[in-house]
Amino acid sequence: MKWKTLLLFCAVLMLAASVSACGSNKNENSTPSSPAAETKSTESASTEPSNSGEAPVAELEGDFEIQYFVGGYGDAWWKSVIAQFKEKYPKLNIKESAGPKINDQMKPRWIQGDPPDVIYLDGAGSNARQQIEDGQLLDLTDWIKEAANIDGEKITDKLIGQPDLFDGKVYTLPLVFGSWGVFYDKALFTQNNWEVPTDFESFLTVSEKIKAAGISPLVHAGVYPGYLVGGVLNPAIVSANGDDASILVDIANAKEGVYKSEAVLKALGQLVTLRDKGYLDKSAIALNHTDSQIQFLQHKDAFIPNGLWLENEMKKDTPAGFSFGWLPSITQAPGGKYVAVPYTNAIAIAKKAKNPEAAKAFLQFIYTSKAAVEWAEKTGALMNLKIDLESANASEVSKAAAKFYSSDNIVVAPTFAYAGEMGKTIEDATIALIDGKITPEQWAERAEKQAATERSKAK
Amino acid sequence: MKRNGGHPLARALSVTFLVFWAFMVVYPMVWTLFGSLKDNQQFFMGKPWNLPKLPLLWSNFSYTWDKYHFGAYFLNSVIVTLGSMALALILAASSAYVLARYSFKGSGVVYYFYIASLMIPGILALIPTFFLLFKLHLNNTFIGLITVYAIGAVPFGIFMLIGFFKALPRELEEAAVIDGASHFGTFFKIMLPLAKPGLLTFSIINLLGMWNEYAFALVLVNDPAKYTLPVGIAVMQAEMQYRTEWGALFAGLLMSIVPVLILYILFQNRITEGVTAGAVKA
Amino acid sequence: MSANLKRSLFIASFILPTFIVYCIFTVYPILRGIYISFTDWSGGSETMNFIGLDNYRELIHDPIIYKAAYNDYFIVFWKVIGIMLIATYFAVALTRLKIKGSAFYRIVFFFPNVISVVVIGVIWRFVYNPKLGILNSLLSFITGKPVETPWLGDSDYALWALLPPAIWAGIGFFMILLIAGIMSIPAPLYESAEIDGASQWKQFFHVTLPLLWEQLKVSVVLIVLTSLNGSFIIVSIMTYGGPDNATQVLGYRLFEKAFGTYQMGYASAVGVLILVLSLLTTVVMRWLMRRESVEVS
């Protein structure tokens, strides 16, 4: 039993080491995000009442619960606006249910009929369409027609992306207006004298140079193919479709024949070109988004399709001197327009909310220019509200994106939600395509087949 | 006893392979330990087998313990594991004893009723169990998870403990009856102490399984304050998609591994016995 | 109180509590799961309509189900081969060949069995990480050029890549089980074989294998059952069923449908399918191995 003693000794040693570490170093590690967020929120909150000047319209009180997913955008904005809201309505007892797993954690409460008042729909496990079908969200159709924010502006006038309709009704308000696109490091490009591509041709040219310099041109999060589909394939489809973006809605809605249309096949052909020329990082298919983003930040790869949250998400791991550049699309023909494929994340009120008045007041409180500017500052992304970003302290990427969006040289696609498993099918097939396992025709065949299934289910 | 040790070449090959496998088993743990002492830069830049740079980042452990609430998860796991072990013991031992030493109508049916569920995949029951706990207002409670774990261990426990109880000599029982002991008295004062090795083995096996259980804990517990360690690790891995802290993640892995490893080394005879008892008679 | 009544009361008080808890927490959920598989329940809705065999009809037409079932059996097959070969080899080596430190190996080889599958999955994900992982770093080091094989990302080898962790984690348990079996083989059998001049090899085939048959059989059935019901955990940690469903297994498909697209009814139908396949497989396995065991004895 000598061995036993020895092994036991080792194990005890390891445990002792970890325990002692827990005791001694407690002071050293500070939680990086929250203290900063809190000081900021109190500052802005204290200035708030003098700004608006007007007394609260109606006194709100009681419990008020907000559920929000914490992902790439972090929680700084939420903490701040909630603190300001509390300042305005001090009698409210506000509870935040937040975190990266919050959707799963709150699911039982929704089923039980004990939901929070307000829900921000984002992240894994969130599914607005399903919640509407299950009758969990409040019908906002009439309310939003007239609703004004606390500055007295009509909310719908200020929105960039209008609310999605389900059977002609509004259940959710888009809160985040994001855009897919392709990121690069401006500093790296300047340093190497690489030209920022303006179309597919120039993308191929510069990729050849990048490859020659020993860097892989394009990395993506293969474990979550949505990044490649959103940032590269979808814009390519729109360009190939003569800049008519409605094709994306047809694709999402399982329309017959759209998957084998010329536009789709041409766009898939562009992916095949990237694959065959070796511009796609071969190992990317095994990377999740963090892994792929790290590769990008470490200059192992030059381009990455991603969303506008990227800069904020990777703040901690971004090397000094890194300067995020963003292009809405890279697949348009020379002289063609850019294509921006936006995404939105919505906010909604629970049908069984216990404090619907406070919930509505909260929406009126956050759909303001002030909150939108703060969103841009804190998350580097865009809130779904028309504001002048130049004056704000927003990130360069957000400003660049805003500029792109307001230019004439761009097609902005509508937002859409995939029917059933259509999205999964497209993503799976796209991965198989770039891995050389199937041809564009087979991709189309698979998608058509799934679409047929979705259509028959809908009946 | 004299034994032929086999061909020298075969022996040499065997030893090589054994050493290789021992390395394969131990190295990932050593590597986890090293990883738990590194910062992100060392992960990105260095070779994965590099030793962690000095100073060692022991702070990863305290960071995981506090920031990722592993302290709480650890405690939850201890509560759930001990609670389910105790409950499983009570539920299984009582039934096993009666089934082993009393003959009554329907005892065969009851026995097979339990044994049959050893064949049925738990995953089918997973979702309904979630809604059942829900209706009983036991969701997100330790009691709910403990009950589910305990009853999940009962069929195997009955199966295993019946063997132990059957092996106890009849005479003891008869002597007890002559002394005027009641059925309860016989069980608690005589039979239970004698079956201690079996009960201990059963509990140790449960300990490993319950400490590491993931699927039910994931679905049945949605309150982060009540997460067990495996769920905590999975959640942490999910969080890694928004924040890269590999050192801290590895520290978390280690916190889950080390306690059971210690218990295993202490009680490895019991476990061997349990594995054998369970399988040889199956 | 008569002695008989006392006896009956005692039996009831010892049998009933367990039995009731068992019915509520084990039997009821299983029956309920079977019932849900005949409904269109989403999991969140208040309505639950009985739709007969519709979910099963969808199941038959779901190409991913076939792939998942194939993958399940692929994993089962190679796990059985891998674990049985290596575990039997180790069991024999540690008992019949006099090897120093056999107690050490016995203890150490069991280590992976005390670790949570979640932890195993996380560790092996790092082994396979294409850029930073041990495997590719080692291959790069040996070959001298950068190797960036996406082990878990290419559908050609992602499924294969799940096997090493599964086998790695299973060896210890079955080795212990087989060692116990070998130790219970009466020593005189080996002694007489040795007197006859039988080599270790012959002893293995003529003594160990036939007398170990029961344990081998149990092991195979256990591997089959545990992996049909448990493979989804390692899949959910390592690959999420991807790429392109290359590592999809039935258990994970159940999760996807239940919590991804909210088709609790369909998910339960997948659960019933797993149940049926497990039972069928066990019956077939036992039947196959029974015939052989008759031949040997």
Image (spheres, coloured by chain):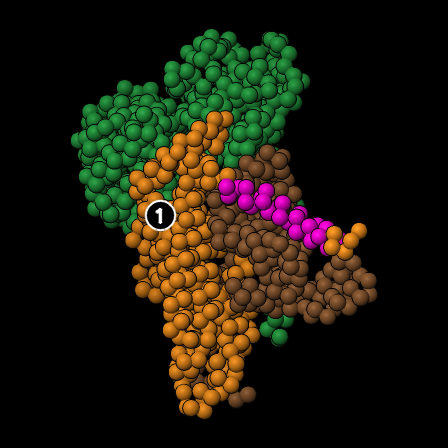
- Residue A186, relative to residue B87: is it above or below? above
Q: Name the residue under label 1.
A: C68
Circle count: 1
Quadrant location, the N terminus of chain B:
bottom right
Residue B250 image point, x, y percent? 53, 53
- What secondary structure characterizes most of the magenta part? helix
Q: Residue at point 78% right, 64% down?
A: B177
Chain colored green: A
Location of residue C221 by image quarter: bottom left
Q: What stretch is highlighted in magenta?
A: C6-31
Chain colored orange: C
Between C200 and A251, the one nearer to me in the picture: C200
- Residue A282, relative to residue A406: is it above or below? below
Q: Residue at point 54% right, 66% down?
A: B281
Q: Chain B is drawn in which colour?
A: brown
Between C139 and B148, the one nearer to me in the picture: B148
- Residue A99, relative to residue B22: is it above or below? above
Residue B247 image point, x, y percent? 52, 51
